[in-house]
Image: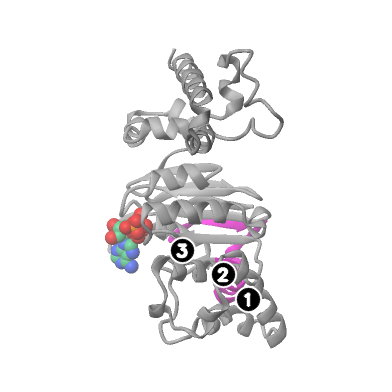
Amino acid sequence: MITVESISKSFNGKKAVDQISFQAFDQEILVLLGTSGCGKTTTLKMINRLIEADSGNIFIDGKNILDQKAEELRMGIGFVMQHSGLFPHYTIQQNIAVVPELLKWDKKKTKRKTDELLAKLHLSEEVLSRFPHELSGGQQQRVGIARALIADNPVLLMDEPFGALDTITKADIHSEFKSLEELKSKTIILVTHDVQEAFELGHRICLMDQGKIVQTGTPREMLYHPENDFVRDFFTKNRLLLEYKVTSLHHISPFLTPENVYYRPNGTGSKSVWDILQQLSSDHQNAEVYEEVVRAFNQYRKSQMV
Ligand SMILES: Nc1ncnc2c1ncn2[C@@H]1O[C@H](COP(=O)(O)OP(=O)(O)OP(=O)(O)O)[C@@H](O)[C@H]1O
């Protein structure tokens, strides 16, 4: 668990981060969301001491991060940098092996772990001998993730890890990312300015503005229980799409007609209405069920607005 207590940071007398507090729990993806310049990256970098806070405290599993050397702290934290952050003059293999080298792993262990991660991240072995500029943006970001995961640290900090990608590639990487076993046991803090990404990946979101946190909550809480107009307005664009994503079959099932049992089998209840409609839309034999799900969703939506 990561506990951030009232941290602040100024640059040239101007507050970039202003008394921020939050907690990120075990097995959670906490998203720091906000527009450019609101202080997300500065907050993230204070956690691994790439930037030292002016005031406040940060604890990882109860231990103050100032109680160990910054280099030691960073060895124990996976970090995915903005724009993949790969070393341009290192091959992909060398880039992935940076931390294992520091940890003095034997070559066989590094190779085995690298191969495992490449397979999981859908990268072919032949990328290993290439340099970063010889890879596509999506491949570079996957390598950045492999590099951050190889030492299997319990904490992972990710700064716009999918930032350079187009929407379609992002959607693919998001679903692969969510299904990675390696991530399920970690505490992850992910920085993004992309609302859809925050909704797809975050268990909870800290919405930031001008160095402060405006609201922390689940994506549903952000949509249906905004604490003020800033939060409400922030999610106005694409609101319908976001509602499809935070509503599950379980929520709309009271509005489905009794004979429509097709979408009530075990295991699908937690699927989002968005995912279900995507699935149904690929086959027009499902047109009736599709309409039924949309109808039930609209009724549920109305019930939430009351
Ligand atoms: N090293 C620095 N020197 C001076 N000002 C800085 C420095 N780093 C950040 N800032 C300023 O602090 C504020 C917060 O920057 P930060 O990078 O944390 O924002 P951000 O929310 O991550 O933005 P982005 O999404 O564009 O990366 C900005 O006004 C920025 O210009």
Q: For the residue carrying disc 3, how many other residues have a C-alpha within 10 Å: few (<14), some (14-19), or many (20+)? A: some
1 and 3 marks in contact (CB < 8 Å) = no
Residue 116 on the magenta span: no
Q: Earlier in the sequence, mark 3 or mark 2?
A: 3
* Quadrant of the image where one finds ligand 1: bottom left
- The dot on residue 45 is 3
Q: Tell me if residue 232 comes above or below residue 295 in the rendering.
A: below
Q: CA distance from mark 1 to mark 3?
A: 26 Å
Which residue is at a point 60% across and 20% down the rendered structure image?
Answer: 253
In the picture of the structure, the residue carrying the numbered disc 2 is 146
Whole-percent x, y for residue 39 in the image: 37, 54
Relative image position of residue 245 (x, y in whole percent):
48, 35
Dot 3 lies on which element?
A: helix
Q: Is residue 259 left or right of residue 16?
A: right
Residue range in magenta is 53-78
Q: Which residue is mark 1?
A: 114
